[in-house]
Amino acid sequence: MSFLSRFNPTPTFPSYTGPYKVGSVDVEIPATDLASPSPAPPSAPSTVAFRIFYPCEAGSNERPIRWIPNPQRGYVSAYARFLGANSALSHIFSVFPQLLYYVSLPVSRNARLLEPPTKTERWPVIIFSHGLGGSRNAYSHLVGSLASHGAVVIAPDHRDGSAPISYVRETENTPAATVDYRRIAHKPSPDVYEQRNEQLRIRLWEQGMVFDALLKIDEGKVVNNLDPNHSTKSRKRERFEVLSMFKNKLDVHRPGAITWAGHSFGATTTIQLVKSTFYHASADEKEGYVPLFTPSASSEIVKQITPASPVMLLDLWCLPLQGPSTSWLRDKPMPCYAPSGPGGTALLAIESEAFFKWQVHLEETKRVLSEFPGSNPPVHTKPGPRFFYPISSAHLSQSDFGILFSWVTTKVFGAKEPERVLRLNVRAMLQVMRDCGVEVADTSRVDMEETGEVAATGKAQDWKILEPKAGTIAGWIPLTTDLDSNVAKEKISEAPSDAVVEGEVMGEMTVENGKREAA
């Protein structure tokens, strides 16, 4: 059977390497059922949608979850349009859709939640924001790997026009709707900044609503899940409401407990959320500042986001942070650098090699991650961020595209070892969580690429992944926020030829000779 599987043309995911099996459930809740910590933007969707990945009981025989959600034909067509006619990925999506219809996530649909073995008797929670061209499923291997190590990971579906397409279910008061992709230039201009801010307003509002949904789910309050798969049968064949099994099992009430993460535009979203919330009290005092998210002082999210909150930024995209109306917030440090904070030990940033080579953007990223972003040069009084990049990695390497279509990312972008690159990302994320006091399972010896006994007295189990010394782990390069005096300090003026911002730019490139040429 294993021999025959080699001839199966359908892309597949590898198994997760954590000690726990992974379950998943889709959630879509009417916005009217939730309390927003910040006023809804005019174009906010009528529902909030997300997928939950979580440790589940072993032995589940639930039906698989398809990587392309329903309606599959609509999603495949949208991806083909998004990627553009000249890309290799678009060719797969448009010509061989039957291969994609059967790609399944290695998770169990609506499986029973495993009892948490943590001291708090609750599972740690991560909220992960997707980038351009992403969705609640597009980072399934990364977030599923985290769930297999003992975390409940929430993957929202952003309805801001950043996904190839989004379907909004009808509610009692609103009709069903479709949110198409918004094609916005990647070069800075007043119009581009405003359009990205419009998207961020929706994204931040959605993040606040997702957080409120988690509070209600953990408190056992009944929420109206519009997804048709919200109930299932257990081994005893009695029906149960899936969300009820999360009651009193999520560590979402303790201040600083939630880990906030995202990729590319999702990393931008994460920064704007934690900073907008943390600095909410002084925002009104700054002339010219137009906040994108204005939580009330009494809201639970203000209590949740603290200097101790772990923040994970994967291939941060800086352009949306540069708008003049939010420049005051841009110059504020991340909350971890507050006087009571631990410094950069709670802040992880992982670049792709493509973004590392985008030198002007790398310098801007260093400023964003530094203790005093507005100073020149940056000043250091606390530990800097955990900051790395894996060699031979592309911008898409942290998403499922790097795993499912590795031959494309290898041929076009020179990406190599997609599974290893994702394992390195997961290892770093888990170890930062451990260092922040979050209880997650140990990293396996296989993932740590070790064969003998570890002689690391007094250090955490996977300490090597965060070691700032080059060469500790092959192909894993530590970085600092020190600026390169040889790089021009002007703002970004154009997208580089050696980096991409999600599949949109990739879709505008030809691949016949393995180079990126404007189509």
Image (spheres, rainbow, N blue to C red):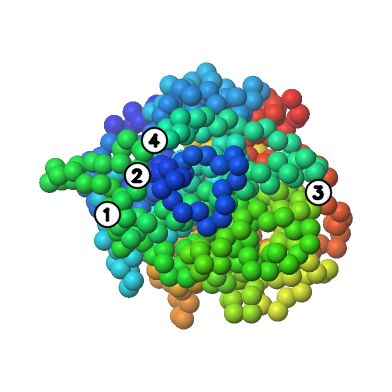
Give the residue at x 79% y 58%: 288
Check contact, mark 3 vs mark 1: CB within 8 A: no
Q: Which numbered disc flags the more N-terminal residue, 1 or 2?
A: 2
Q: In the picture, which quadrant includes the N terminus?
A: top left
Q: Earlier in the sequence, mark 1 or mark 4?
A: 4
Marks 2 and 4 close (CB-CB < 8 Å): no
Residue 407 in the image, given as x and y percentages of width and height: 55, 33
Measure the C-alpha gap from mark 1 to mark 4. Answer: 26 Å
Q: Nearer the viewer, mark 2 or mark 4?
A: 4
The residue under label 4 is 172
Q: What type is the residue that disc 4 sits on? A: Glu
Q: Residue at x 33, y 65 (%)?
A: 122
Under tag 4, what secondary structure? loop
66 and 214: which is toward the camera: 214
Residue 388, position as x, y percentages in the image: 63, 60
Mark sitting earlier along the chain (3/2): 2
| Label located before the other in sequence (4 or 3) | 4
- Position of 70 with respect to 116 (left or right) is right
Q: Residue furthest top?
A: 95
| Disc 3 residue type (three-letter) | Ile
Q: Which residue is mark 2?
A: 224
For mark 3, give the secondary structure: loop
Callout 1: few (<14), some (14-19), or many (20+) C-alpha neighbours within 10 Å? some
Instruction: Give the residue at mark 3.
Output: 492
